[in-house]
Amino acid sequence: MPVDAAEALAAEPRVREIAWDHKDVQLYHLGIGAGRPATDPRELRYTLESRLHVLPSFATVAGGGVPGVIGALSVPGVDVDLAHVLHGGQRLRLHRPAVPVRGRANASSRVVAVYDKGSAAVLVLRTEVADADGPLWTDEAEVFVRGEGGWGGERGPSGRPSPPPAEPADHVVERAVREDQALLYRLSGDWNPLHADPEFAARAGFERPVLHGLCTYGAALKAVVDTLLDGDVTRVREYRTRFAGVVYPGETLRVRMWRRPVADGAGAGETDETEETPETEETPETEETPETGETSEVRVAVSAVERGDAPVLADTVVRYG
Ligand SMILES: CCCCCCC[C@@H](O)CC(=O)SCCNC(=O)CCNC(=O)[C@H](O)C(C)(C)COP(=O)(O)OP(=O)(O)OC[C@H]1O[C@@H](n2cnc3c(N)ncnc32)[C@H](O)[C@@H]1OP(=O)(O)O
């Protein structure tokens, strides 16, 4: 059986040392579309080493993606065809206000949930990253594997993505995706040919290579940080999304944002009714978001302008201090 849930869940965490420096950060920023226009003082913070800050979504590639997406799926009990794999969702919690420009840390990854959707399997991979000073971030990727369900396993959280709020958005920005964006983004470590090789993309059922989900994820966070947080990357506490539709390089992303206070009593580490946190073991202590002042959040909806309002990122929330 290509997905053996019991074996995947029982596997020991995979622990590896990761390291990164300013060059990795700059490459990542270029990969998600930063640096245009190249002389804009705000953009220079994404590209110039003397002013560099780190967009927190860099955490999803820190360490060069080593050993890359294929390695990340090399888990006991998981033997799937990469052409059937789509990124289904992503969640990131920061345990410190800023991701450092250079770092060395231990990353511990394991499968924390496996769901049987009948026609697909959903794997939840959690990675906890800590350096000598303590926890840095926790990252959770939901991996949707088409054609691998049907073994009678737990179905997990159900439901379609929730629609965006009915009221007009507080902010709407558009961000063009370069034709070669995926070719640039993959240099940060996700070498999946789905994003570069037309023949592989056709085998996976797409008319041409699609953009990495995490590239859209980074571009949307950058739009939020630049628009709402005055470019202050240190205010981001948590960021989650569901990948609801593909993006093709060359399209334009429309990012709509609705600000709202976090409901009374809902700490940054807690969930709300729209959230689809997998029902796994209790959230470990280290996943608490730091208490660095009042937390607000923004609901975000992302679509590709060329294809109307159909969401490409749904159930998307950024929490910030
Ligand atoms: C370490 C990191 C590892 C990362 C691996 C990824 C490697 C990358 O290189 C790969 C990528 O970047 S791929 C590009 C980004 N992703 C995408 O573009 C996917 C876009 N989404 C889709 O196409 C569909 O929503 C699709 C296909 C996802 C689902 O659509 P449908 O097949 O129509 O499914 P649907 O009928 O709506 O739902 C069936 C059941 O599945 C659940 N579900 C749906 N979308 C989900 C999602 N995105 N994540 C988790 N669960 C999801 C539904 O809730 C439903 O469950 P139930 O029947 O119980 O209600």
Image: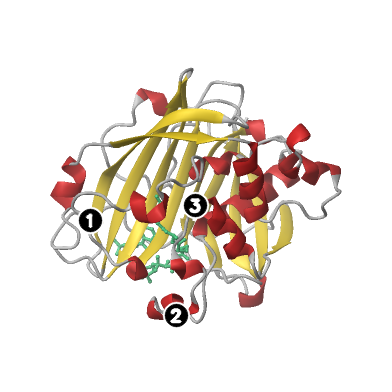
Name the kind of residue labelled 1 in the image: Val
Q: Is residue 159 left or right of residue 4?
A: right
> What residue is shown at x 44% (from left), y 41% (from top)?
272
Whichever of callouts 1 and 2 sits on the residue coming sooner in the sequence is 1
| Pointer 2 residue | 199
Whichever of callouts 1 and 3 sits on the residue coming sooner in the sequence is 1
Spatial distance from mark 2 to mark 3, Cα to Cα?
21 Å
Q: Which mark is residue 78?
A: 1
Asked if 184 appears above or below 92 in the picture, the reply is below
- Is there CB contact under 8 Å for labels 1 and 2? no
Q: Which mark is residue 31?
A: none
Name the colouring of the figure: secondary structure
Depth check, mark 1 against mark 3: the one in front is 3
Name the kind of residue labelled 3 in the image: Gly
**Quadrant in the rendering for residue 271:** top left
**Quadrant in the rendering for residue 204:** bottom left
Which type of secondary structure does the marked residue at label 3 adopt?
loop
Q: Report the quarter where the N terminus lies.
A: bottom left
Which percent across, then down, holds residue 300? Answer: 60, 52
Which percent across, then down, holds residue 98? Answer: 61, 29
Which type of secondary structure does the marked residue at label 1 adopt?
loop
Name the kind of residue labelled 2 in the image: Glu
Q: Is residue 273 left or right of residue 150?
A: right
Which percent across, then down, holds residue 31? Answer: 63, 55
Asked if 104 appears above or below 178 in the picture, the reply is above
| Pointer 3 residue | 189
Mark 1 residue's CB less than 8 Å from ligand 1? no
Q: Report the quarter where the C terminus lies.
A: top right
Depth check, mark 1 against mark 2: the one in front is 2
Whichever of callouts 2 and 3 sits on the residue coming sooner in the sequence is 3
Spatial distance from mark 1 to mark 2, Cα to Cα?
24 Å
In front: 178, or 259? 178
